[in-house]
Image (tube, rainbow, N blue to C red):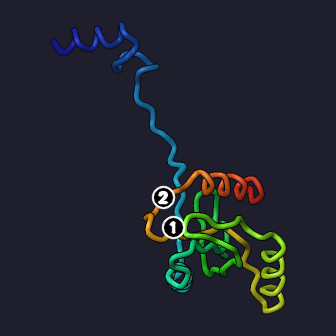
Amino acid sequence: MEQSIQQMLSRSGGGMGDAAGVDQPTPDTSEQIHISSLALLKMLKHARAGVPMEVMGLMLGEFVDDYTIKVVDVFAMPQSGTGVSVEAVDPVFQQEMLDLLKLTGRHEMVVGWYHSHPGFGCWLSGTDVNTQQSFEMLHQR
């Protein structure tokens, strides 16, 4: 009976007898993000202080490799947010902050962004997805 099932599967394009139907390992392209205690506490404090408004900030650190990001610190972005939206990253303020960090001997780069959804839980809105796509286009690895 086992052989008849395998024959049936191979005729239908599945099963182990057909190379197209053999399970192939899928490469792991998931990312690991290591966030320092300092960065996490600063994000939580920022989000808590912003309630009921949304807040946004940038994450500083390094791209360790193609699949690993190390976040060591964050800084809050000035924005005019509401309870349901927040303006995108201000490139002028971002550059000024990075220049100030370099003056103090800090050479981390922007590796990501964060923002809150007070009262709505953790999810990506359509605006968040667009922000992330823009970020990835500007910061390709």
Q: Which quadrant of the figure has residue 67?
A: bottom right
Q: Which of 32 and 42 is in front in this view?
A: 42
Alpha-carbon neighbours of circle 1 within 10 Å: few (<14), some, or many (≥20)? many
- Mark 2 / mark 1, whichever is N-terminal: 1
Specify whether 103 is left or right of 31.
right
Q: Name the residue under label 2.
A: 123
- Residue at point 72%, 54% (across, down): 134
Pick whichever, 41 or 53, lies toward us.
53
User: Is residue 4 toward the left or the right of residue 111 in the image?
Assistant: left
Relative to 29, residue 64 above or below: below
Q: Position of residue 85 (x, y in %)?
A: 60, 64
Furthest residue toward bottom = 104
**As shown in the figure, which amino acid type bears the numbered disc 2?**
Trp
In the rendered structure, the answer to whether residue 19 lies left or right of residue 133 reads left
- Amino acid under label 1? His
Marks 2/1 in contact by CB < 8 Å: the verdict is yes
Percent of width and height locating residue 56: 63, 72
In the image as oriented, which residue stretches furthest toward the left? 1
- Residue 3, horizontal then vertical, whole percent: 22, 12
Q: Mark 1 points at which residue?
A: 117
Image position, residue 16 (x, y; %): 35, 21
- The residue located at (66%, 80%) in the rendering is 76
